[in-house]
Image (tube, rainbow, N blue to C red):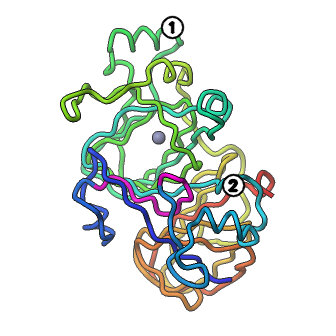
Amino acid sequence: MGIIFLEPVFKQMIWGGSRLKTVFGYDIPGNDTGECWAISAHPNGDCLIKSGGYAGMTLSALWENHRELFGNAQGAVFPLLTKIIDAKEDLSIQVHPDDAYAKQHENGSFGKTECWYVLDCDENATIIIGHHAQSKEELKNMIDKQKWKDLIREVPVRKGDFFQITPGCIHAIKGGTLILETQQNSDITYRLYDYDRLSNGKKRELHIEKSIDVIEVPYQEKKSSGAPLATPNHWFKELINCDHYIVWKGTVDGETVLTQDRLFMLVSVIEGSGYIGQEPIKMGDHFILPFGYGEQPVKGKFTVICSSVQQAVYS
Ligand code: ZN
């Protein structure tokens, strides 16, 4: 089985822009396009297979009916979701629940762990990760008194930065930032603060109680735990290895070999172009390398973000 290319799904958002067209060349629905759901089997944006024997099928149907392509991985739903996010304006400040909380409070849904690779950003751009409260009491107090400036942790951001956002971590992308997000396949978000903005004359709904329930206090910066996972791909650099996914950045300039030794691997081309085996690939392509894809020569000048699940969890 060869490469499985996917057709992205686009989402218009009040904070969206036009860089999914100007940078990536996608045919977007409007100049307020905020999200490209690039590899997704979520019911809110289920990608179609672009070509080959499965062309026109949704990724969720492929997962349902051809589990052999995914190494017979277990699980009712496809576990990962890859997005590109173009924030022209600031996104609301939010937090996600973990699996246990979401299961209990959100009809059995997954929680959400996500991570961001910064594709591009304005000069002097910042990003919101974490907070400064030292106890739940202090957190509640600062939220009650609307002391957002004191509470929210804002840090500088540069192209190529990477952030892991675990459940309970307050986060937000600010205007001028273009990121690639790899996340658990979930859409559960609690909105903590929306800068008091009005949308069609009123403020968007907040979820203060649930946010307070799930926010981790105090905030702790998350890094990969332990040694990087062994990979035969020497041109891969591991960005994160957590319970829900492993994410690598791969850079090719010339010729090398790609070994797909995982149950399956998600690949997004974020720069350049080249070949994997006989298949031409270019910036903006998103695809899945199925189980048993094996070893293929690669050549060209390109950068990819790749992800996979932990074998032990899903096999
Ligand atoms: Zn999020």
Figure quadrant of the C terminus: bottom right
Q: Nearer the viewer, mark 1 or mark 2?
A: 1
Whether the magenta-drawn stretch holds residue 38 is answered as yes
* Amino acid type at mark 1: Glu
Q: Are marks 1 and 2 in contact (CB under 8 Å)?
A: no
Does residue 22 appear to the left or right of 116 in the view shown? left
Q: Residue at image x 35%, y 18%?
A: 150
Disc 2 element: loop
For mark 2, what is the residue?
228
Q: Residue at image x 58%, y 66%?
A: 59
Height in image: 203 above or below 142?
Answer: below
Disc 1 element: helix
Farthest-out residue, bottom: 278
Quadrant position of residue 118: bottom left
Distance of mark 1 from mark 2, alpha carbons? 37 Å
Farthest-out residue, left: 201
Q: Which mark is residue 137?
A: 1
Judged by its main secondary structure, the magenta piece is strand
- Residue 176 on image: x %, y %: 26, 49
For the record, the magenta segment spans: 33-44
Q: Residue at image x 59%, y 88%?
A: 277
Whether the magenta-drawn stretch holds residue 133 is answered as no
- Residue 183 on image: x %, y %: 55, 50
- Residue 190 on image: x %, y %: 46, 30
